[in-house]
Image (cartoon, rainbow, N blue to C red):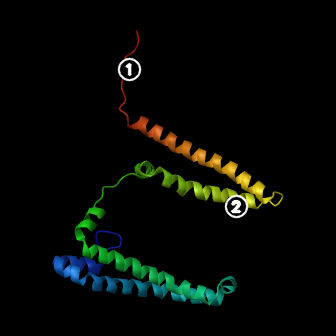
């Protein structure tokens, strides 16, 4: 796909170049539908034969999936492609100014994006990292058959608290090092 972003389509590019704002607003749905249908067809060309091949050649796939799983394996990828491309194109055509502002964002280094995300919502970051960590700890503890369920929960709680404290300490250390790096270095006078 060509254009000024990864998911820009030729149809959207042509429409933006040749139509007025009013025409764009009134035709955005049809253009988006056409783009979505094309994405559906192209993805379906791959997912339907791949699912058929998996049913024919993989005993594990045949055994592990029922009719609904097989239909979903063939149908969900094209449905996602249709929805994603149609929505992206419709948004692009309906509000070109907003899209240009979004696309024209300056590139920010990954460590700055990380710091900004943690600064804006530290509880969300802690939940995004801590919950899977504690879940993984519980999963590992659940494999220990010599422990009772309450002991597994207690071990998970203790190790989970240690993990969350380690995460918090790591973020605090990162912020401290980042702030030291950002401060201008002052020259101290030498003692005589």
Q: Which residue lies furthest to the right in this view?
A: 146
Circle count: 2
* Residue closest to the eye, 117 or 51: 117
Q: The residue tagged with tag 2: helix, strand or loop?
A: helix
Count residues near mark 2 (Cα–Cα under 10 Å), then give few for <14, some for 14-19, many for 20+.
Answer: few
Residue 19 visible in the shown view: no
The percent coordinates of residue 43 (x first, y second) are 45, 83
State the residue at coordinates (42%, 85%): 40
Q: Mark 2 points at which residue?
A: 139
- Rendering coords of residue 74 (x, y %): 53, 86
Q: Residue at x 22, y 79 (%)?
A: 25
**Residue 177 locus on image (x, y percent):** 47, 38
Give me the disc on residue 188: 1
**Residues at circles 1 and 2 in contact by the CB criterion of under 8 Å:** no
Residue sitting nearer the eye, 83 or 159: 159
The crowding category of the residue bearing disc 1, from other C-alpha atoms within 10 Å (few below 14, some 14 to 19, many at least 20), is few
- In the rendered view, would you say 174 is above or below 78? above
- Say which label, 1 or 2, has the lower sequence index: 2
- Quarter of the rendering occupied by the N terminus: bottom left
């Amino acid at each position: 796909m060509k254009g000024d972003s990864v998911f820009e389509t030729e149809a959207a590019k042509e429409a933006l170049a040749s139509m007025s704002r009013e025409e764009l607003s009134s035709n955005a749905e049809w253009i988006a539908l056409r783009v979505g249908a094309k994405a559906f067809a192209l993805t379906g060309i791959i997912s339907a034969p791949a699912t058929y091949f998996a049913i024919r050649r993989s005993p594990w796939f045949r055994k592990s999936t029922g009719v609904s799983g097989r239909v979903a394996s063939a149908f969900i990828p094209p449905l996602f492609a249709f929805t994603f491309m149609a929505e992206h194109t419709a948004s692009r055509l309906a509000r070109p100014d907003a899209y240009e502002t979004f696309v024209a964002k300056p590139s920010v280094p990954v460590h700055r994006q990380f710091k900004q995300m943690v600064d804006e919502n530290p509880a969300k970051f802690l939940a995004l990292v801590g919950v899977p960590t504690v879940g993984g700890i519980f999963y590992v503890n659940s494999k220990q058959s010599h422990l009772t369920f309450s002991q597994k929960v207690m071990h998970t709680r203790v190790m989970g608290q240690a993990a969350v404290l380690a995460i918090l300490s790591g973020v605090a250390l990162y912020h401290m090092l980042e702030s030291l790096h950002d401060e201008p270095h002052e020259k101290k006078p030498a003692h005589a």
